[in-house]
Image (tube, rainbow, N blue to C red):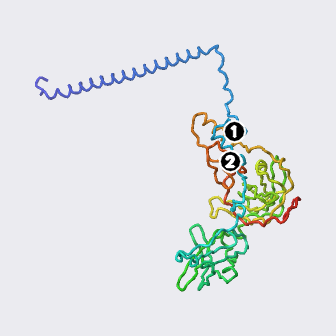
Amino acid sequence: MAGAPDDEEEPVERGSSRVRRFARGSLGALGLFAGVALLATFGLIAWGLAWLAERGSHEGAPPPEAAGPAQTVAIASLADADTLPPSVRRYLENTVYPPNVGRLTAAQQDLVHPNRRFEDYRPIPETFSQNADEIVTVRLTCDHYYYEGDDPIEVSLEVLRGNTPVELLSLDAGATREGRAGLEGNRTPLRFTPGEDGWLASLDPTRFADHHGPILVDARIEYAPGTFHEETLRLFFTPAGRIPARFTSEVDDALVNGHLLVRIGIEVDQPGQYRIDANLYDRNDRPIAFGAYKGELSRSDRTVPIEFFGRLLRDAGARSPFRIGEIRGYRFLDGAYPDRERMAALPGRYVTRDHPLDAFSADEFMDAHKANMIELLMEDVARGIAIEAPPIARPGGDPVPGPAGDAAPEGTQPTPTPSPEATTPNAPSTGASASPGRT
């Protein structure tokens, strides 16, 4: 092989070098793996020894004491007012009565007359003048807002210049269904005729038997040659086929657990979630309280209970026999438009039995939710969390200003914010008989 060229030996030397490098790399990897495994083994051994030592230290020791009962905050009441934080005291002052009842005053016209309209004369801007006798005013209205079934819909229109009726040169009026997205269907003509106080028209509800919801009434008047003005109003219509239930003439009352429980007769056609409202007046027809039932009703239900809280009647100094009136209600339709099917109101007023004032409970309202709220407030105060005391609520929904320590004005009591319920107003009581019955 002496005469072989030098480059024939190179491949052998390169191959040997590769083998040596591979061997060194393999040994290094094996060493690293062995090191990691050894460390892991030492770690497991150390953990096991520590566990055994800890276990040995507890042998013979008494078992840990069982945890005691959770610490709770004592339920507060207004009797503890002097010792309570301002925020808690104010919360109690605002929740003396349950949320389904509240004080009623003559100032709350939306509840005393829940279906009354309040349109006033509106001036036509083009007639504004320093001379009041030159200003033309218009009032377009009807007898109430909610209508059910075949209730006649009477619309009136008055146009005055100063205090003098204006003789209209032309009048074009109509009524149109209104849905979620706006006006629907054809406009139904509305014919006005002259009356003692302006112009009168009757809207036939059967023309809207397929519609449930608002109806827009519009009128375009010509009050001077070539001069026009447009006026509109809305009413809410529930056709006979959508009335979910009806009140019967049966109303009863009883003193139960220190509260006045009124049971109102009902016939339910469509089961569901209902709200039923009623007002309570004393024997002199002074407004005292509003009450509500909110819950499920089924076809098997024959009465609806409304409880008037005893503490409220005592605070108001209410004298029986009471009058129960403005009984109205609806079925709630969650997510629908309109979101309620209204019932026809129960007319008149029911006269209760005679109940002595001291028979009613003087206790404040308390339930699990209120107790939990008190505990949360007390815990926050204990942690140093600042809580701003809200104003005191009073009848009519207007807050009483002032710091938390201020007392509510005499004769006022906490009440929930009145709901904007509305339905047919009831006739005033015509008698003061102490025996139960209708007047």
Which quarter of the rendered picture does the N terminus lie within?
top left
Residue at position x 77%, y 54% in the image: 306
Are there few (<14), some (14-19), or many (20+) residues within 10 Å of tag 2?
some
What is the distance, in whole Å, between disc 1 and disc 2 at their CAs? 14 Å
Whole-percent x, y for residue 188 in the image = 63, 79
Circle 1 residue: 81
Whole-percent x, y for residue 326 in the image = 75, 62
Are there few (<14), some (14-19), or many (20+) residues within 10 Å of tag 1?
some
Is residue 335 found left or right of 49 in the rendered image? right
Q: In this rendering, is residue 33 above or below 270?
A: above
Question: Of discs 1 and 2, which sits in the foreground?
Answer: 2
Q: Which amino acid does label 1 sit on?
A: Ala
Circle 2 residue: 408
Location of residue 280 (image quadrant): bottom right
Q: Residue furthest right?
A: 435
Is residue 146 found left or right of 357 in the rendered image? left
Which quarter of the rendered picture does the C terminus lie within?
bottom right
Q: Which residue lies furthest to the left in this view?
A: 3
